[in-house]
């Protein structure tokens, strides 16, 4: 489908089409970065409740203006000094790529007497620019005792972004490797329930590789 076609369809219709094409067990996070409160409300009215933003301040502003039963997903790179703004309400933090970010989330979550669910971001793409831990770094982190010190952070899985390429075989290979690693960890860590991978261009590949959460923006709301 061309982007110009997507723009001509309604947000509700786009959502319905995606929902119909994915298994009911997969969580669809509607990514609303740069989109208006009115556009988000259109998706909300269509029944959508999981929304994702990549900047803490933008997410916080939208949270304040929108219905409180929305589950807000922070999907972007995190700046520790902004964690305090979202600690009261964030539903799931996808992009943990530093131990120190977890320390800050734990501290801020404690102030609100909450446990914040987090995913560790794994660097699976070939590009240098994408954030995330290597597989080795994740293993080291999980094998250390450090994670047990957190009382208000719960690691419930992994997140990854494939290389930006037209080569579907490469995308599939990257997703499958992450999924295999996730399945392996699940045996040892039963709290690992969530694998966040797949965006507008590659969510079908991600789901067939075992994704449980997809993050879809432009296929719902049109281009940015
Ligand atoms: C923007 C964004 C998405 C959604 O991208 P689309 O191609 O518009 O579906 C997914 N994940 C992350 C981390 C993003 O920043």
Image: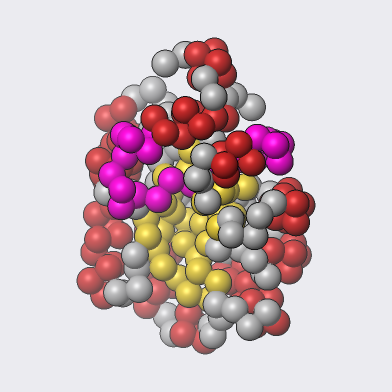
Which quarter of the picture shows residue 102? bottom right
1 shown above or below 148? above
Residue at horizontal 30 percent and vertical 60 percent from the top: 182
Taking the magenta stretch, the answer to whether it contains residue 19 is yes
Residue at horizontal 71 percent and vertical 41 percent from the top: 37
Residue at horizontal 56 percent and vertical 48 percent from the top: 51
Residue 131 placement, left or right of 172:
right
Taking the magenta stretch, the answer to whether it contains residue 171 is no
Residue 99 placement, left or right of 154:
right
124 shown above or below 146? above
Residue 174 drawn at (x, y percent): 33, 42
Residue at horizontal 24 percent and vertical 64 percent from the top: 184
> Quarter holding the C terminus?
top right
User: Does residue 51 appear in the picture of this structure?
Assistant: yes
11 shown above or below 28? above
Which quarter of the picture shows residue 69? bottom right
> Quarter holding the N terminus?
top left
Magenta extent: 18-40
User: Which sits in the foreground, 204 or 162?
Assistant: 204
User: Which sits in the foreground, 206 or 188?
Assistant: 206
Residue 105 drawn at (x, y percent): 63, 72
Residue 27 drawn at (x, y percent): 40, 50
Which quarter of the picture shows residue 129? top right
Residue 52 drawn at (x, y percent): 57, 48
């Amino acid at each position: 489908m061309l982007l110009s076609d997507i723009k001509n369809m309604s947000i509700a219709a786009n959502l319905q089409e995606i929902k119909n094409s994915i298994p009911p067990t997969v969580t669809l996070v509607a990514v609303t970065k740069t989109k208006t409160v009115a556009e988000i409300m259109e998706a909300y009215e269509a029944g959508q409740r999981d929304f994702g933003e990549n900047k803490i301040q933008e997410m916080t502003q939208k949270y304040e203006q929108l219905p409180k039963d929305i589950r807000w997903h922070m999907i972007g790179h995190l700046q520790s000094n902004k964690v305090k703004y979202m600690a009261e309400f964030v539903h799931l933090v996808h992009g943990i790529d530093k131990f120190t970010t977890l320390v800050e989330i734990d501290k801020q979550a404690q102030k609100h007497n909450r446990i914040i669910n987090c995913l560790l971001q794994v660097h699976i793409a070939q590009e240098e620019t994408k954030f995330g831990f290597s597989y080795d770094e994740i293993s080291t982190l999980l094998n250390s005792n450090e994670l047990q010190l957190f009382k208000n952070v719960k690691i419930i899985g992994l997140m990854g972004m494939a290389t930006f390429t037209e080569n579907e075989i490469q995308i599939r290979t990257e997703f499958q490797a992450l999924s295999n690693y996730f399945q392996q960890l699940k045996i040892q860590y039963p709290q690992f329930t969530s694998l966040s991978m797949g965006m507008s261009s590659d969510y079908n590949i991600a789901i067939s590789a075992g994704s449980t959460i997809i993050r879809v923006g432009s296929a719902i709301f049109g281009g940015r």
